[in-house]
Amino acid sequence: MLESLYNENEIKQFSALTNTTRRLSNKDEITIQANHLCQSIDVDIYLEGNVTVDMINMKDYPYRSIENTIEYIYEIKKSNINTVLLHLVGNEYGQDPYKVLQDHVQAIQQVRKHFSKEELNITIDPFMTAFNQDGSWGVKDEFGKLKYLETLNLLAEIATDYSLAGADGIITLGRVEGEVEVTKKALAKISSNMKIKSFSQNTETTNAYMYLENLPDQLETGQKILVGNLTEMNLRTILDIHEGADVIIVKPIENFHLITLTLDFITNTQSVAAFLNSAKAKELLEANPFVKHKVDQILADLDAFEAKCAGVTVGAYSVSGTYFIHKSFEKEKGGRFSLGLMDELLKNAISAAGDRLDSILDRNAMWIIQNK
């Protein structure tokens, strides 16, 4: 049969091959290093003493008191992980967001007293400052309507206070129009170099709520992008860079295509222009004139946008559902299976980000380094 498909010389070339597999190299392009990872920690700032409280469905990942968090960070640093993401939690729905913010400030200051900026990089998730029972985020009136200007003011106050308390980075949540811009302006006002890490493509995924006993009735917040709406995800990525984001955090980490697309945008303004001029993007923009005005600014000065991109990096965030899957593997199949799954996940994310990787924010970070 082969003789009818190839000539004699081609068959001789096949016969001379010493490597007849598809693999071209036995060397790993990617090895997972401690400096690739950021350890996520849920800190219940109202717990007293050195204590932990179990979290639903999150084996080996409890809520930690501030005192316990400090002790835990010392352990994390033994694995040469020197960056953490603190989810500051513990308050109830409907509390005064400015009171919660001041409690956050005190917690940040307590942690920072133990670790200098050279020793530990701290990013803060402000989610619980203004988290509402319906799943939305922001300041609301008595009728449940978002008070937009007050929400923007809160965002500015959060950025300012976190920076002055000693935080190195702040998460912008991918929830409110202009959140990156107002955060950037607030930080510029105090000459702060705190990094803005944006959940630019944040979607209405159910996989991010594994720590809840039951899914809420109104799971869709109305604020986040619908799952699969790639045009909007790309648009928000570009807009957040325009408004001043330092790091684009892809959430959830499994969206490898968004990591590679983000890398393309920050290294190739031709890709940015082509996307913004695409039919799908134009259709979306025509229905949203406020956003279209910002896009027009980008297209009018692509050199300025390219300059902004020069300092932008890419990260990824493992949601609670990802952690739950790994722990389920560990329980049912053993640690080697779980580690294998994590190894593949992280290597793919790290390789997708290339030389512009910031970090992977993961609840399993220390465990991975200890067990790899």
Image: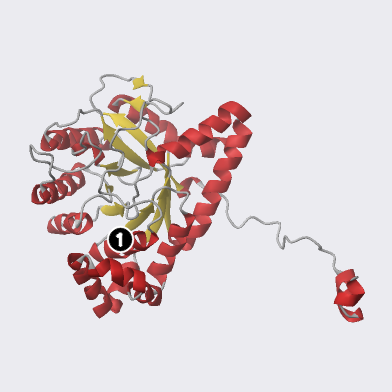
Is residue 291 at all visible to an observer of this figure? yes
Q: Amino acid at mark 1?
A: Arg
User: Quadrant location of the N terminus?
Assistant: bottom right
Q: Residue at x 24, y 56 (%)?
A: 193
Total tally of numbered discs in the picture:
1
Label 1, on which residue? 236
Residue 346: percent from the left, percent from the top?
52, 48
Measured as percent of width and height from the top left, residue 189 is found at: 12, 58
From what the image shows, is residue 110 above or below residue 169? above
Q: Nearer the viewer, residue 295 or 76?
A: 295
Residue 281, given in percent of the width and then of the height, sits at 32, 69
Viewer-side residue, 183 vs 276 = 276
Q: Is residue 12 visible?
A: no
**Residue drawn at x 18%, y 68% as measured from the top left:** 289
Q: Nearer the viewer, residue 198 or 104?
A: 198
Above or below for 196 versus 11 = above
Name the quadrant of the C terminus: top right
Rendered residue at 30%/31% (across/down): 43
Q: Secondary structure at mark 1?
A: helix
Residue 197: where, in percent of width, then height? 31, 52
